[in-house]
Image (cartoon, grey):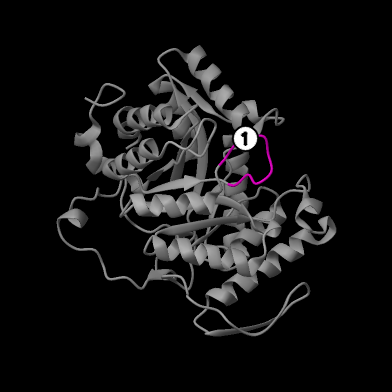
């Protein structure tokens, strides 16, 4: 028996597959294809091609639980989740471990689980340094990295990072172009931009995934979603947005794909969903809100976004996300520690996901 009361091993064939989200023909790995028993044991595509990833616990309130997190990641891989994801909050009250560094640790604990971050506010980073860090995690994971990016909203503490608020979106777009140049096959990079001038710089090594790890965009404003389609490979709705807002964003993304002449089948759409299962709905609601407040504090509107309640309640909430247009869901329990998230992961795999076929 496992936490949650049911061993979901018999359900593994129904959970996820190993398709690399956002890659298709555009993103490939330079690694040889895995073969043998381990590959054969991976689950088949879940109903309708739906994919499910799980969040990686980042809170470090009482010291880093290395054993607990390593076991959590191993179990997530055993259960067949598509990926394990983190988020970025460089400035904030929550004691969150830095995302790329945590993913480097996760890479050493796993073999097949894809690793993702959603989203890096890349306007607050130096593009060449960020490109190098992303390359490192991609190589350490042997090509299992997905990268979410966004310019960040106007509420960000731009002066703390030496970024001009008036030009942060232009700086973000240019920075992404420079990162892609750094990841290109060219051994030396020359780049003439508004904010950055790069002249014949040698940049090595390159990411395993070519031309670079899949780029997921966040955002919700129409211009942001148009930018996502123009510059990205996939879209991930924020956990801090409601299902209704996500549905609106999906409509806009699909419109932009048509306008820009891109195939919707080649542009995955997913959503992070904050959640908590408890046999008592009131307790579930209390626990999920406590978890969200640990991350976001008193952020306006955050109480309206989570899915919580009994197993049936959570299934219904996730069905709404799927109906809104998600082809993948990042399931994000918000427990106090990795042990509590582990209990939630076991219940999701055993009791929730099998009902979403």
Q: What secondary structure is the magenta-colored segment mainly?
A: loop
312 w.r.t. 51: above or below: above
Check residue 205 for magenta coloring: no
Question: In the shown orientation, is residue 211 left or right of residue 166?
Answer: left
The residue wearing badge 1 is: 94
User: If the image is split into quadrants, where does the N terminus sit?
Assistant: top left
What residue lies at 51% left-to-right and 36% top-to-bottom?
Answer: 273
Question: In the shown orientation, is residue 42 left or right of residue 271?
Answer: left
Per the image, label 1 sits on a secondary structure element best described as: loop
Q: In which quarter of the image is residue 68?
A: top left
Q: Residue 213, can we see it?
A: no
What residue lies at 26% left-to-right and 67% top-to-bottom?
Answer: 33
Q: Of residues 327 and 273, which is closer to you in this image?
A: 273
What residue lies at 54% left-to-right and 63% top-to-bottom?
Answer: 133
Residue at the extreme left: 37
218 w.r.t. 243: above or below: below
Question: In the shown orientation, is residue 211 left or right of residue 20?
Answer: right
Q: Position of residue 240 (x, y in %)?
A: 61, 37
Q: In which quarter of the image is residue 316?
A: top left
- Disc count in the image? 1
Q: Of residues 211 and 62, which is closer to you in this image?
A: 62
Q: Residue 191, can we see it?
A: yes
Q: Position of residue 164 (x, y in %)?
A: 82, 59
User: If the image is split into quadrants, where does the C terminus sit?
Assistant: top left
Find the magenta span and give its range.
88-96
Mark 1 residue crowding within 10 angstroms, few (<14) / some (14–19) / many (20+): some
What residue lies at 30% left-to-right and 25% top-to-bottom?
Answer: 3
Q: Where is residue 148 in the image (x, y as percent from the top left)?
A: 55, 55
Q: Of residues 350 and 91, which is closer to you in this image?
A: 91
Q: Where is residue 49 in the image (x, y as percent from the top left)?
A: 35, 49
Question: In the shown orientation, is residue 201 left or right of residue 279?
Answer: right
């Amino acid at each position: 028996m496992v936490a949650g009361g049911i061993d979901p091993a018999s359900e593994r064939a129904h959970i996820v597959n190993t398709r690399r989200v956002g890659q298709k023909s555009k993103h490939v790995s330079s690694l040889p294809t895995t073969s043998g028993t381990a590959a054969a044991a991976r689950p088949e595509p879940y109903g309708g091609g739906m994919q499910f990833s799980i969040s990686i616990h980042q809170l470090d309130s009482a010291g880093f639980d290395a054993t607990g997190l390593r076991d959590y990641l191993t179990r997530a891989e055993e259960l067949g989740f598509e990926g394990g994801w983190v988020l970025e909050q460089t400035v904030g009250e929550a004691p969150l471990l830095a995302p790329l560094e945590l993913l480097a640790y996760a890479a050493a604990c796993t073999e097949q689980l894809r690793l993702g971050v959603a989203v890096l506010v890349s306007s607050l980073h130096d593009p060449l340094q960020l490109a190098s860090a992303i390359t490192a995690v991609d190589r350490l994971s042997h090509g299992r990295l997905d990268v979410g990016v966004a310019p960040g909203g106007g509420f960000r503490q731009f002066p703390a990072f030496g970024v001009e608020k008036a030009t942060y979106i232009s700086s973000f777009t240019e920075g992404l172009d420079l990162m892609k140049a750094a990841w290109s096959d060219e051994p030396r990079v020359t780049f003439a931009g508004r904010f950055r001038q790069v002249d014949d710089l040698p940049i090595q090594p390159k990411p395993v995934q070519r031309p670079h790890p899949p780029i997921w965009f966040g955002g919700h404003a129409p211009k942001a979603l148009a930018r996502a389609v123009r510059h990205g490979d996939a879209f991930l709705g924020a956990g801090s947005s409601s299902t209704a807002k996500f549905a609106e964003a999906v409509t806009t993304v699909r419109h932009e794909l048509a306008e820009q002449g891109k195939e919707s089948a080649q542009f995955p759409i997913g959503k992070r969903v904050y959640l908590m299962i408890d046999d008592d709905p009131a307790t579930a609601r209390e626990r999920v809100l406590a978890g969200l407040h640990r991350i976001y504090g008193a952020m306006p509107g955050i109480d309206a976004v989570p899915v919580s309640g009994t197993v049936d309640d959570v299934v219904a909430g996730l069905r709404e996300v799927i109906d809104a247009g998600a082809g993948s869901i990042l399931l994000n329990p918000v427990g106090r520690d990795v042990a509590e998230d582990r209990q939630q992961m076991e219940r999701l795999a055993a009791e929730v996901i099998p009902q979403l076929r």
